[in-house]
Amino acid sequence: MTYDVIVVGSGPAGNTAAIYTVRSGLKTAIFTGLSVGGQLTITTDVENYPGFTKIKGLELMNNIIKHSETLGVDIIYDSIKEIDFSKKPFKCKTEGGSVYETKNLVIATGARAKWLGLESEKHFLGAGVSGCATCDGNFFKNVPVAVIGGGDTAGTEALHMANIASKVYLIYRKSSFIRMNKTLADKILRNEKIEVLFNSEVLEVCGTDNPKSVESLKIINNINNKTSEIKVNAMFVAIGRKPESEIFASAGIIVDEEGYIVTEKDSSRTNIKNVYAVGDVTNKKYKQAIVAAGYGCIAGLEIEEDKENYEI
Ligand code: NDP
């Protein structure tokens, strides 16, 4: 099967690109990947997507996918595992064993959570260790918890947990908030339920195995090397994300030192002609659904523009 456009990834970025390309008469498919709809589906309430005063992330995402499907985009519930950019049309192999061809490819695969890399973190993953307070925070009502990190995600997650938990330790390796936006940092420092442990790093997650649950964290002060233990029942790791760009990088797409796909300035065009990248896989700063959707729109318009000069 040959498409004009294959979109890899089914979040706001990928769907918006598909909505634009299918409306300009291009035969378009979205490969959903394993997490259909992406990050938005694990977000509870969304209150900053224009047109919706308040909507559940999952409902908004389902609406967006339905929108693509209604316009005639093929929604294919499979993942792309290998791509050959050496000849046109590009060949895409799927996890399910099929091969598809496409004249244009839109990479909209997003980014996944980063972890501290501790054995004990892995051991308690899903049993008190989580990468998303918005998703799992409600399981830790009225008990103490910790959030790790010093960026806007950590700040947002700490504030979110302050409404749920009995106490929130925000554990950050630097001596002040150098990265978090000031309004958020001020809110954190004023919140009586949040205790910020600066210059601190987690050494070990401790707990029981029967049932598997977190009971405390061993931490170290990286200035005086003093270790201590804090009682918490959950650890939310919010130390950034890793873009899902590996298969594209190994096929020749240029990525930066953190793995984000490099595009032309104010554009979705990558270093390979007719390959476009949009959303969190290329944007390390503004990880918002509306921004991702905006970039999806840019890719849709650029594919339309580039159609005139398409070269085999
Ligand atoms: P960031 O990359 O901004 O921050 C990651 C944080 O984790 C940093 O404080 C970093 O420390 C810390 N960190 C990284 N690796 C480790 C490690 N191995 N051990 C301990 N700490 C570590 O990621 P975010 O997810 O917070 O934000 C990403 C982007 O999304 C930002 O541009 C942010 O502004 C944006 N965002 C915006 C929101 C909003 O507008 N409401 C909400 C959430 C995110 P250090 O500072 O020392 O490097």
Image (spheres, rainbow, N blue to C red):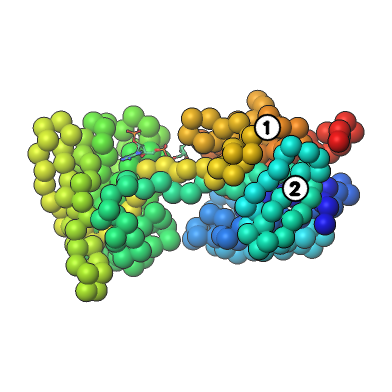
Ligand 1, what quadrant?
Answer: top left
The residue lying toward the viewer, choosing from 81 and 23, is 81
Q: Which of the 4 image quadrants contains residue 294? A: top right
Residue under numbered circle 1: 270
Extreme residue toward the top, this view: 265
Instruction: For mark 1, give the secondary structure.
Output: loop
Look at 83% across and 52% down and name the residue there.
2
Instruction: For mark 2, give the secondary structure.
Output: strand
Look at 32% across and 47% down and name the residue there.
117
Residue type at the position of mark 1: Thr
The residue lying toward the viewer, choosing from 123 and 13, is 123
Look at 16% across and 37% down and name the residue there.
221
Q: Is residue 84 visible?
A: yes
Extreme residue toward the bottom, this view: 210
Relative to 98, 257 lies left or right: left
Residue under numbered circle 2: 91
